[in-house]
Amino acid sequence: MSIQLPVQQLLEESAAHECEGVGEQRVCVKIVSIAELPTRFGDFQIVAFENNRDGKDHIAIVRGDVTNAEEVAVRLHSECLTGDALGSLRCDCRDQLEAALTAIGKLERGIVLYLRQEGRGIGLANKIRAYALQDFGMDTVEANLALGFRDDERDYAVAAHMLASLKVRSIQLMTNNPRKIDDLKRLGVNVTGRLPHVLPPNPHNEFYLRTKAQKSGHMIDLRDFKGKVHLPEQSDRPVVKGMTEEQVKALYE
Ligand SMILES: [Zn+2]
Ligand SMILES: [Zn+2]
């Protein structure tokens, strides 16, 4: 690996760090440890954060030296144990995470912020409850709502502070939703552009190409070949290479 983070400097600055907190909930995070993380997607460093709100250890997966850097590619990913680690096909979190790490692994510098917001903030057990509701064929809309509804503001406050702790000057956000940029800007992040986050087509997400997105309120009802509805666990709608402009547009209507 070429250039890396100035570990000692970041740790010392974080140890001495005091602030009023970011966002309405006044979230403050500190870097507590940094280690090398060689992965199948490339060489990264992993940065562990602790915060003053809950016991959740958020992490940043960092490529290259992002301190004082401009236009750093950044992806926000919400933890999904069932998808990320177990390869569940009830969601596309793993596809989204792998696409982000693959893309950033090829860059000189970039960051995946891995936010510990299982089930979009409702927690693992409640997420499994939402899955179970679907298995019994009832309350799909409720299950969707349970997973789809959360306090986004908090996530972005944590993310904004993590980027400040890493001393990133400006970012290019990997997202398909232009509105996310405003959320981060509001919290003081200098977002200079957007990088579309497009998944490569594979057997696990090909149904997005085949199925026409149907609107029911703000929910999108997409069923894969196993008949399970894919719940929107990431804050971004998945876009797969090969989707028509019309299909992509329908995701955000
Ligand atoms: Zn702080
Ligand atoms: Zn998931």
Image (cartoon, rainbow, N blue to C red):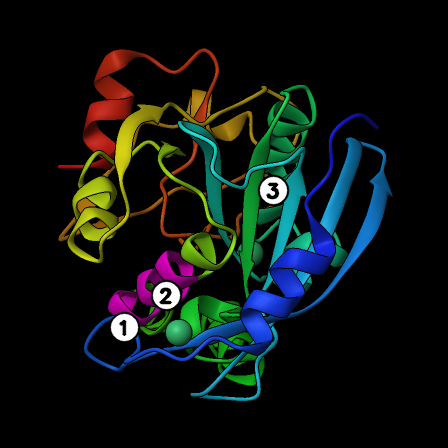
Residue 204 in picture, x, y percent from top left: 64, 34
User: The N terminus appears in which quarter of the rendering?
Assistant: top right
How many other residues sit within 10 Å of disc 3, few (<14), some (14-19) or many (≥20)? many
In three-dimensional space, the C-alpha distance between marks 3 and 2, rounded to whole angstroms, equals 17 Å
Q: Are marks 3 and 2 in contact (CB under 8 Å)?
A: no
User: Percent from the top left, x then y, of residue 71?
Assistant: 40, 27
Judging by the rendered image, the residue that carries numbered circle 1 is 151
Identify the residue position indicated by label 2 in the image: 155
Kind of residue sitting beneath label 2: Asp
| Residue at 28% in and 80% down | 20
Q: Earlier in the sequence, mark 3 or mark 2?
A: 3
Count of all numbered marks drawn on residues in the image:
3
Q: Is residue 143 above or below residue 68?
A: below
Nearer the viewer's eye, disc 1 or disc 2?
Answer: 2
Q: CA distance from mark 1 to mark 2?
A: 8 Å
Instruction: Report the front residue among 96 and 156.
Output: 156
| Relative depth, front residue between 197 and 163 | 163
Q: Position of residue 201 (x, y in %)?
A: 58, 19
Give the SS element for disc 3.
helix
